[in-house]
């Protein structure tokens, strides 16, 4: 029994590992929509415990705690020591 890959869906990209243009586009749209929803939730709740964590920064939040976390994460990945002032 052969499986048919559901082309043009995020499922085809994620679960069947199809990399055709239709599946890539569907995955890109799905990921964009997911990030937008997550950012909307973050902005709706400014006291959320997610603020100041790398996941919130990657979702697009640029409040002060999230920006600081993003900068520190980039420094750590580059291996650049934090400047002391």
Image (cartoon, helix red, strand yellow):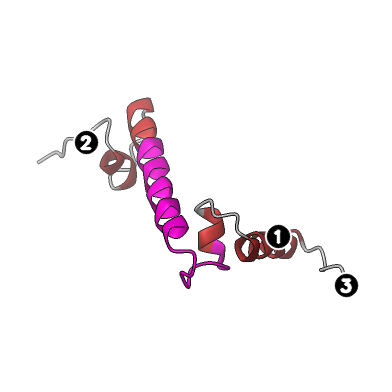
In the image: residue 57, left or right of residue 26:
right
The secondary structure type at the circle numbered 1 is: helix
Residue that carries the numbered disc 2 in the rendered image: 5
Question: Residue visible at 83% across and 68% down?
Answer: 81
* Magenta-colored span: 27-54
Q: CA distance from mark 2 to mark 1?
A: 40 Å
> Any mark on residue 84, and which?
3
The secondary structure type at the circle numbered 3 is: loop
Question: Which secondary structure type mostly characterizes the magenta part of the structure?
Answer: helix
Kindly report which numbered mark, 2 or 1, lies closer to the viewer in this rendering.
1
Q: Is residue 37 magenta?
A: yes
Quarter of the image for the C terminus: give it. Answer: bottom right
Coordinates of residue 7 in the picture (x, y in percent): 25, 31
Residue that carries the numbered disc 1 in the rendered image: 71
Coordinates of residue 14 in the picture (x, y in percent): 33, 46
Marked residue nearer the N-terminal end (2 or 1): 2
The residue positioned farthest toward the top in the image shown:
21
Question: Residue visible at 17% across and 35% down?
Answer: 4
Question: Residue visible at 58% across and 68% down?
Answer: 52
In the image: residue 81, left or right of residue 32:
right
């Amino acid at each position: 029994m052969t499986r048919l890959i559901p082309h043009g869906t995020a499922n085809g990209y994620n679960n069947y590992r199809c990399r055709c243009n239709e599946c890539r586009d569907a995955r890109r749209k799905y990921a964009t929509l997911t990030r937008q929803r997550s950012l909307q939730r973050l902005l709706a709740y400014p006291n959320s415990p997610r603020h100041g964590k790398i996941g919130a920064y990657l979702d697009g939040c640029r409040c002060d705690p999230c920006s600081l976390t993003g900068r520190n994460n980039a420094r750590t990945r580059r291996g650049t020591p934090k400047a002391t002032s």
